[in-house]
């Protein structure tokens, strides 16, 4: 009996050292979380090389953390992420498709008529967001939706 307990303890230690964490109830591998390899500052775009997966050992860890590289790759952080700490999904956003002050093309289309004009966004925005844009030629401020190609589809007032 004593021999079996001793072997059991060694197996558990070996599994822990090798990073194989098993749930005693199910015998399945535990969940993983992504943590930064280095400090990642607000506004930085995260790549797969900047993070690593670690096994979750704390059963009381709050949910809402990233667990797959696909969740964070190409995203921009809105706060400082520290090495070894989980990455809250709520602290990530899509990269801006248009940036305030950069040149864009305004597109208005209605019943076959298409009008384009140069514009300047008044705010940063991601694809699909509604923003305000100044028409460079007329100075008029219009609202529109950011499209996949970076143009702004102007909405009718």
Image (spheres, grey):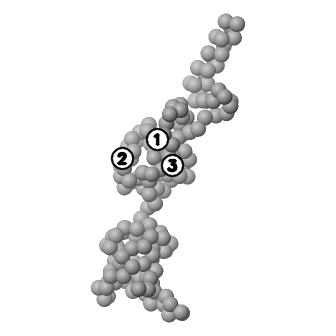
Q: Compared with residue 3, is residue 128 higher up or lower down, i.e. above or below? A: below
Q: Compared with residue 79, is residue 103 higher up or lower down, i.e. above or below? A: below
Quick one: 31 or 69, which is closer to the camera?
31
| Front of the two marks 2 and 3 | 2
Q: Secondary structure at mark 2?
A: loop
Report the side of 1 relative to 154 (left or right). Answer: right
| Front of the two marks 1 and 3 | 1
The extreme top residue here reads 2
Report the side of 129 relative to 136 (left or right). Answer: right
Residue 77 coordinates in the image, percent (x, y): 41, 53
Location of mark 2 (residue): 80
Which of disc 2 and disc 1 is earlier in sequence?
2
Mark 2 and mark 3 in contact? Answer it, CB < 8 Å.
no
Residue 48 marker: 3
Neighbourhood count class around disc 1 (C-alpha, 10 Å): few under 14, some 14–19, many 20 upward: many
Residue 142 coordinates in the image, percent (x, y): 36, 82
Mark 1 and mark 3 in contact? Answer it, CB < 8 Å.
no
Q: Compared with residue 118, is residue 95 higher up or lower down, i.e. above or below? A: above
Residue 95 coordinates in the image, percent (x, y): 44, 61
Disc 2 and disc 3: Cα gap in Å? 17 Å
Which of disc 3 and disc 2 is earlier in sequence?
3
The residue depicted at 48 percent of the width and 56 percent of the height is 74
Write down the quadrant of residue 4 in the picture. Answer: top right
Location of mark 1 (residue): 86
Neighbourhood count class around disc 3 (C-alpha, 10 Å): few under 14, some 14–19, many 20 upward: some
């Amino acid at each position: 009996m004593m021999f079996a307990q001793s072997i059991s303890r060694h197996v558990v230690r070996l599994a822990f050292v090798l990073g194989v964490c098993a749930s005693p109830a199910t015998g399945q591998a535990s969940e993983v979380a992504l943590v930064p390899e280095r400090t990642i500052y607000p506004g930085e775009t995260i790549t797969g090389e900047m993070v690593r997966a670690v096994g979750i050992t704390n059963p009381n860890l709050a949910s809402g953390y990233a667990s797959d590289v696909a969740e964070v790759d190409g995203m921009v952080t809105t706060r400082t992420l520290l090495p070894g700490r989980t990455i809250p999904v709520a602290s990530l956003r899509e990269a801006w498709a248009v940036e305030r002050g950069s040149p864009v093309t305004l597109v208005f289309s209605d019943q076959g008529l298409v009008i384009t004009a140069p514009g300047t966004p008044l705010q940063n925005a991601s694809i699909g967001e509604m923003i305000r844009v100044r028409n460079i030629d007329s100075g008029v401020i219009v609202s529109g939706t950011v499209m996949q190609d970076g143009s702004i589809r102007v909405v009718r007032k």
